[in-house]
Structures are given as structure tokens and as C-alpha cells.
């Protein structure tokens, strides 16, 4: 091989963001990179790079370290992102750079790992022996309208509201495998996000303390993206209908969200329609941690679990 593969070293980010621009034709600054990979304070960056004879980074598989509730315990997991290879080194999927870089990457992570990929990447990962079929992500969308729930209210809350942690501690064991959705996570993922601005709303029952659920929303023209949410199971409908009413008042025409298939019937009962969006969550079979049925049944995800929504 006319390149070597190693784990990330401090300073690599300057070349990584240049490769990102070259491959994806989008800008990512080093400050944005540091927020993404180091913003939660983790120092065990398991990203890997390929370097040519001249010291240039020609390939990269990124890993964002996240805290998770997984298989009945708190653990560290890794979200695979920013998989990119200089076009001069593409091809040879069973023995080329993609295969060698991916093998080094996946075999270096012996805990829970996941990612969101498009159809081409899914096919490529299956050919290379990295992926097997698991979850097809759906866009759930609905036209906004007004609902009346006089005993409940939805109001904007602060990212540092202690009620966020109280809710998480109350329900985390019942939602499945999930990133730890506490105040620390929300502040990193949304409040400090250098790419876009979001708002956080909490569902409350009038005349009582605490929250029954929360949503994080991003406004794009006349559409409300519900990019993250957490709720006490019995109050999902209240939370969503209050959010749709709020969006209706603010002249938003449509709302879109992602949730695991477990909630499909309840979302459809509200009026949501679903469509395959061409995004997939494969089950990783290099150092396999779980089977597809377990992953499909247990993995709680929203748009917040990606790095592109």
C-alpha cells in the first residue's frame, strides 16, 4: 500500500476539513469540527485517517463519542460520520482503501456503534462486509392544525432547566437504547451548535411542576422540523399536538420528524404520513455487538442522532 492508516492525532483536523470540502463540496471550519468531535469533552477520538507518502490525509472515517443507555447500562458509543476518501483512491471495495480504512475503523471500536447512511453507502458497506440490513428511516410528516388541550401547555424552556434531567432519570430505562438525553447533551447538541439554531419547548400540565416531555425544533421556511424529542409514553400525543398547534399559529404549513417504527401506529392515528427517505441505519457486523432484530426493536432515534439534520 502506498499509504498508512492510523487513528486521529491532534492537528489532523486542519487536513480533515480540507478533505471534507474536497469530497462533499461543503465547508466545515476547524471550530465546527471541534464542536462536533470534542464539544462534549471526550478525548478518546476513535476517528481514523489514511495518509499518503507525502503526509497528506487522503481518507477519513469519523467517530463521534456519545454517552448512551445500552443493554441496561450506561456506556460509551460511537456514531460513524464523515466517511470520505480522495477520489484518486476510490474503488477496489474488497481490497482498496475503503476496505482497509473501514476495517481498521470498525475493528478498533469494540462497543456499540451506529451510523446513518444513504443507499449507495449501504450497498458499499455490505459488499465490504461491514454492514447488514437493519433500519430504514422514514420521514413522518403532517400538515399543521390547531388542537385544544386546556389542561396542558407547551412553552419554551431553558437548555439548563433541571426538569430535563428529572424527566430523563424518570423514563430512560423504558425507551430502549438511546443517547443520554440530559441537559449536558442538549446544550452540546443544540444550544452550542455552530451550524444552525434550535428552540426547546417543554410540555407541562397546568398547575403542576415539572415537564411531561420536550421537543427541539428547527424552522426552515414554512416547515417545522422536530429534530429531537423525549416524552413520558402516555403523553406523546399531547406533546405532538401541542407542537402542531404552535406551528399552526406561527404559520408553519408542515411538520416533519423521525421516530422508531414502534410509534408508527400512534403517529398515523394523529395523522402523520410516512415516506422512505433513502436513509438507513445498518447493523455493524465488524465486532458485532447485537443482531438486527435487537437493533430495530430497541434503538431509539430522532434526527438528533445524525450529524446532517
Image: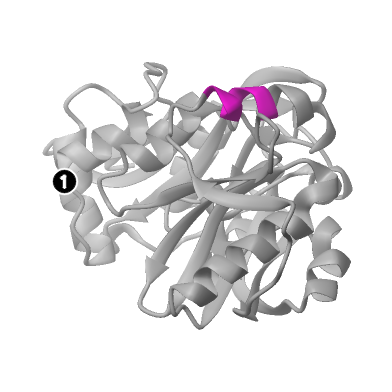
Stretch of the chain drawn in magenta? 162-167
Relative to 210, say whether 44 is above or below.
above
Relative to 309, say whether 143 is above or below.
below
Quadrant placement of the C terminus: bottom left
Residue 147 visible here: yes
Packing grade of label 1 (10 A; few <14, some 14-19, many >=20) is some
Q: Position of residue 185 (x, y in %)?
A: 48, 30
Q: Is residue 6 left or right of residue 206?
A: left
Q: Is residue 140 magenta?
A: no
Which quadrant holds residue 117? bottom right
Q: Is residue 166 magenta?
A: yes
* Residue furthest out toward the front: 207
Residue tagged 1:
29
Magenta: main secondary structure? helix
Residue found at x 79% / y 38%: 175
Q: Position of residue 92 (x, y in %)?
A: 46, 61
Q: Is residue 272 left or right of residue 153?
A: right
Q: Is residue 89 left or right of residue 206?
A: left
Q: Quick one: 176 or 17, which is closer to the camera?
A: 176
Residue 94 visible here: no
Residue found at x 42% / y 60%: 218
Q: Quick one: 118 or 106, which is closer to the camera?
A: 118
Q: Position of residue 301 (x, y in %)?
A: 66, 49
Q: Is residue 3 left or right of residue 288?
A: left
Q: Quick one: 273 or 260, which is closer to the camera?
A: 273
Amino acid at each position: 500500500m502506498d499509504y498508512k492508516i492510523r487513528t486521529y492525532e491532534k492537528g489532523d483536523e486542519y487536513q480533515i476539513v480540507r478533505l471534507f470540502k474536497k469530497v462533499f463540496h461543503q465547508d466545515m471550519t476547524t471550530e465546527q469540527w471541534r464542536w462536533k468531535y470534542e464539544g462534549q469533552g471526550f478525548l478518546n477520538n476513535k476517528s481514523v485517517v489514511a495518509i499518503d507518502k507525502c503526509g497528506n490525509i487522503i481518507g477519513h472515517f469519523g467517530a463521534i463519542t456519545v454517552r448512551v443507555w445500552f443493554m441496561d447500562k450506561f456506556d460509551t458509543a460511537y456514531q460513524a460520520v464523515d466517511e470520505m476518501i480522495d477520489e484518486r483512491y476510490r474503488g477496489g471495495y474488497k481490497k482498496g482503501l475503503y476496505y482497509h480504512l473501514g476495517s481498521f475503523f470498525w475493528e478498533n471500536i469494540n462497543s456499540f456503534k451506529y451510523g446513518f447512511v444513504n443507499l449507495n453507502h449501504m450497498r458499499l458497506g455490505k459488499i465490504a462486509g461491514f454492514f447488514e440490513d437493519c433500519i430504514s428511516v422514514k420521514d413522518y410528516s403532517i400538515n399543521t392544525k390547531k388542537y385544544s388541550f386546556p389542561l396542558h401547555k407547551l412553552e419554551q424552556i431553558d437548555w439548563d432547566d433541571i426538569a430535563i434531567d428529572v424527566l430523563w432519570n424518570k423514563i430512560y430505562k423504558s425507551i430502549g437504547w438511546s443517547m443520554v438525553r440530559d441537559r449536558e447533551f442538549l446544550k452540546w447538541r443544540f444550544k452550542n451548535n455552530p451550524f444552525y439554531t434550535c428552540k426547546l419547548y417543554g410540555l407541562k400540565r397546568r398547575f403542576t411542576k415539572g415537564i411531561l416531555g420536550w421537543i427541539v425544533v428547527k424552522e426552515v421556511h414554512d416547515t417545522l422540523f422536530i429534530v429531537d424529542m423525549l416524552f413520558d409514553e402516555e403523553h406523546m400525543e399531547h406533546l405532538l399536538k401541542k407542537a402542531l398547534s404552535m406551528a399552526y399559529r406561527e404559520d408553519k404549513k408542515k411538520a416533519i420528524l423521525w421516530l422508531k417504527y414502534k410509534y408508527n401506529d400512534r403517529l398515523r392515528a394523529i395523522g402523520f404520513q410516512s415516506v422512505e427517505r433513502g436513509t438507513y441505519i445498518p447493523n455493524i457486523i465488524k465486532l458485532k455487538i447485537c443482531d438486527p432484530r435487537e437493533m430495530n426493536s430497541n434503538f431509539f432515534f430522532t434526527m438528533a442522532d445524525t450529524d446532517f439534520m
